[in-house]
Amino acid sequence: MRDTWGISGPTFIGLYLAALAVMALGHAIHRKVRFRGTRGAAAGDLGPQQVAYLNGGDQLAVYAAMGGLRAAGLIGTGPQRTLVQTGPLTAGVTPLDAAVHNAAGHQVRSRDVLGDQWVRSALDQLRTGLEQRGLAVSRADLGALRLWAVPVAALLAVGVLRLIAGISTGKPVGFLVPAAFFTLVLLIAIARTRRTATAAATRAMAELRSRHSHLSPRQSPAYATYGATGAAMGVALFGAASLYSMDPAFAAEAEIQRAVAGGSGGDTSGYSCGSSSGSTSSCGSSSSCGGGSSCGGGGGCGG
Amino acid sequence: MAETYGVGIGWRPEIAGFVAGLPGLRFAEVVAESVHAHGELPPGLGDLIERGVTVVPHGVRLSLGGAEPVDPQRVRHLAEVAERVRAPLVSEHIAFVRAGGVEAGHLLPLPRSREAVDAVVANVRRTQAELAVPLALEPIAALFDWPDDELSEADFLTEILDRTGAGLLLDVANVYANARNRGTDPLELLDELPLDRVAYVHVAGGAEHDGLYHDTHSHATPQPVLDLVGELCRRHRPPALMLERDGDYPPAAELRAELDAIAHAAGYPEVTAA
């Protein structure tokens, strides 16, 4: 009986597993390097919206801006879930504040704020600044990492072909099935790689979260006392749930997705998306949700 | 408390970040029942203690004025919390919060009778026996007087303090509220009280409602209360005076201004500056 493709079963599975191991290791190392960020990057001077972007992507950055504007009494909700302006913009606001306030002036529906052109460009500006400081993972880095999907997919194809050939000639394929399965797992993991904050930024945020622990919704913070910046920082560090803690009527009217972010992995306060009930839809619908490790992996979200 | 602490504030989780940001702060009070005797301290409170701020546990559930003996478990908790936060003293109210096993959920005033004095004294002594630090007693605001009052407010308090050796936690806002609602002069009460026994002072805001002044702790401290702080300090300045705010917290600038106003009235340094 001839070996399939002229290679014996044990030799093939050995080569296959070696290739799989090299790819998995290569991807892991590449990932670590690309996600490391700038060690010791100064994060102490980060504003609430920057922190919010790192913690929960575009959506949370917009929520942080909305929290600050709401605490300052500058926006409210109108009919049909729209945002409205309730006061003129003051000096010293960020471009994103101005963009969200402007969107409210057009009575944009709150869930459509992310699509507003001015808001989009303010977010791009925010992200670019963070990428340059080594705090945000750049889209180029994510793209480079996803290229690992090409060799892994090729390996999977070889494995599947061998499996078909082996089955059709009645050869044993007991080792190949799990090997192909692990290749598929690796491929999915690569394809789903999403990340907003670099490792450096994640460390910095853990420090910020402990420094601002008084803003955790668990403390029922007196947002009026902490002011607009405190309110925005609360949303940035502890997620959209802070908006519900601060102004439940506004948050509900504005259809704030409670599950957006809420502290990344390793957060000792344990305050994650889990507080919301049955909100899997609100979590999955937004691309921003994949940013925080507490959310993207699936475990921490929508509990 | 031989040491002077100046102006302090009631620590609450809602304003923990504000309290942490007061550079000159040396005195704070925490609701004793909100602190675990053995578990983790509330976030932020530990940092305050590490910073050298004196934190005094303030009990609200002991029911010293109850006819039945104080619950030994509650007393033990108060003692353990005092140790936990390294407090130089603790405080409780001269009031009852339960009777016959029914919880009132409120601090209720006692009739000022000799019998009530005896009951309070017995409970205070039971509490003191378990405490490693001195106890200060706070009379509460009362919107009414019991019909069978035998003693004046000052005599009632002085007798309890004399027989127990406890300190006085004087609530200036209460003195003001009681006098105003009874149509008496708050200064008269100040003059009758043993001011040298004052361990520290509560200052708080209130509001008038249906002709009665309520000591709400959720409004700004009104000028007459600040004036009373000034009168008190002219007679005998207590080692610490603290702002008691329990809700409807205003912007930080307003809280800071209130703390400064108390400092000015008492002649103590501002705690909002380093």
Image: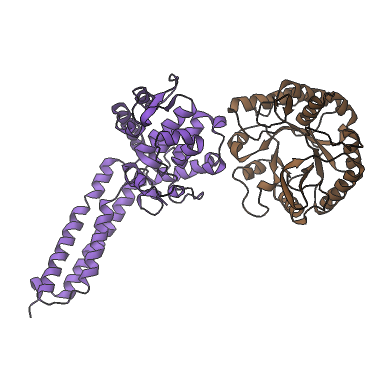
Chain colours: A purple, B brown
A11 up-or-down from A242: above or below: below
Compared across the picture, whether A64 is left or right of A131 comes to right
A225 up-or-down from B135: above or below: above
Q: Nearer the viewer, residue B105 or A121?
A: B105
Please tell me which residue is depicted at 80% across the width and 39% down the height of the picture.
B109
Q: Where is residue A205 in the image (x, y as percent from the top left)?
A: 45, 42
In the orientation shown, which residue stands out farthest toward the front?
B147
Q: Nearer the viewer, residue B52 or A189?
A: A189
Quadrant in the picture for residue B38? bottom right
Compared across the picture, whether A168 is left or right of A87 comes to left
- Residue A157 in view of the camera: yes
Please tell me which residue is depicted at 7% across the width and 81% down the height of the picture.
A1
In the orientation shown, which residue stands out farthest toward the bottom?
A1
Count of numbered badges drawn on the protein: 0
Quadrant in the picture for residue A123? top left
**Image quarter hosting the C terminus of chain B:** top right
Compared across the picture, whether B10 is left or right of B125 comes to left
Q: Position of residue B273 (x, y in %)?
A: 65, 27
**Image quarter hosting the N terminus of chain B:** top right
- Residue A82 in view of the camera: no
Q: Where is residue A196 in the image (x, y as percent from the top left)?
A: 35, 43
Compared across the picture, whether B267 is left or right of A125 comes to right
Q: Which of B59 and A28 is in front in this view?
A: B59
Q: Where is residue A217 in the image (x, y as percent from the top left)?
A: 52, 41
B74 up-or-down from B204: above or below: below
A129 up-or-down from B47: above or below: above
